[in-house]
Amino acid sequence: MVKTAGGLPAPVVKGFVMVRLENITHGYGPARSRTQVLDRVSFLMPAGQMWALTGASGSGKSTLLNLVGLLDRPSEGHIELAGQCVTGLNAYETARIRNQLIGFVFQSFHLLPRLSAWENVALPLVHRGMGKNARRDAAMAQLEKVGLAERLYHKPDELSGGQRQRVAIARALVSSPRLILADEPTGNLDSESGAMVMQLLRRINRETGVSILMVTHDERLARTCDRTVVMQDGRIVQTGAG
Ligand SMILES: Nc1ncnc2c1ncn2[C@@H]1O[C@H](COP(=O)(O)OP(=O)(O)OP(=O)(O)O)[C@@H](O)[C@H]1O
Ligand SMILES: [Mg+2]
């Protein structure tokens, strides 16, 4: 990865490879009784694209997303993010790369109930040593981008599902990631809110160039992505445009 003077990763430009997976194999449980969940998965995702990962329940989608997000390590294989090999890094380096490169969006939002919208969005900035005012300004700017400038002081239970997910997207964006990993971001939403969240992710992808890898069961939403990757029993069985 190219480093800038400040030690932060340089912006990843379109045409670069954002995610390279090489023969990723993964299982859960102790070695002998290990259940094989991923079997030699390889792909190359160019920076700036938005991809959908689909497939039946249990096919290994979340497992794969967690490995790309450095939340777990593959049993075998090799992962590169923005040109840097990330398998074999120690816990400190792994956390640093994850914080600098990746934003997560989850099906059930994962917002802290006692914090307001802006406080939830600002949370990832606490570890960056920013003062409260700077954190609030950064969070407010992101909430404006997702259309929630009027909801800064609302708690999660005072927001609709679609609004909660937009807060979660603002939180994922606040640390200027290069890659957003979203596991069924529309899974808990009605179809109208789901379509709105999807349009928002697409707009953010086009405007900022952030790469998005998204798990979805919704084929209609998957078709709006640059590429669909279909998984079955831990293997990629099909990839296609849109
Ligand atoms: N922590 C774990 N320990 C043991 N087995 C696990 C664990 N997590 C997942 N599995 C198993 O790995 C397989 C793949 O699970 P995964 O969650 O990746 O599927 P998925 O494609 O995301 O499914 P869904 O669409 O239902 O979310 C499943 O058979 C699951 O039971
Ligand atoms: Mg899953």
Image: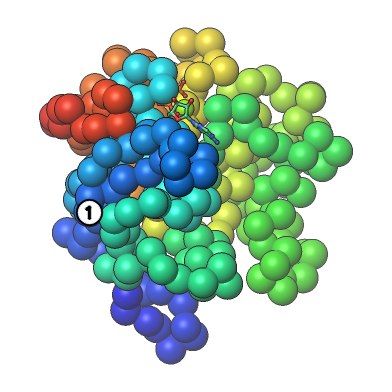
Left or right: 135, with 69 as reference point: right
Q: Can residue 239 be seen in this view?
A: yes
Q: Which residue is drawn at 22% across and 59% down?
A: 17
Q: Which residue is drawn at 36% across and 74% down?
A: 10
Identity of the residue drawn at 53% across and 10% down = 190
- Where in the figure is residue 176, as x and y percent of width and height? 49, 59
- x%, y% of residue 65? 41, 41
Which is nearer the eye, 233 or 174?
A: 233
Residue nearer the viewer, 106 or 5:
106
Q: Classify mark 1: residues with Cα within 10 Å, few (<14), some (14-19) or many (20+).
A: some
Tag count in the figure? 1
Q: Which of 32 and 110 is in front in this view?
A: 32
**Residue that mark 1 sits on:** 22
Q: Where is residue 137 in the image (x, y as percent from the top left)?
A: 69, 59
Asked where in the image residue 221 lies, by quadrant, the reply is: top left
Q: Does the residue labelled 1 lie within 8 Å of ligand 1?
A: no
**Screen quadrant of the C terminus:** top left
Q: Is mark 1 on a helix, strand or loop?
A: strand
Q: Is residue 9 above or below residue 62?
A: below
Q: Is residue 141 above or below residue 146?
A: below
- Here the colouring is rainbow
134 left or right, relative to 182: right
Which quarter of the image is occupied by the N terminus?
Answer: bottom left
Amino acid at circle 1: Glu
Find residue 125 and report its horizontal and vertical position in percent. Answer: 67, 62
Q: Is residue 83 above or below residue 75?
A: below
Is residue 144 in view?
A: no
Q: Which residue is drawn at 58% across and 72% down?
A: 92
Q: Quadrant of residue 164?
A: top right
**Extreme residue in the bottom direction:** 5
Q: Which residue lies furthest to the front in this view?
A: 32
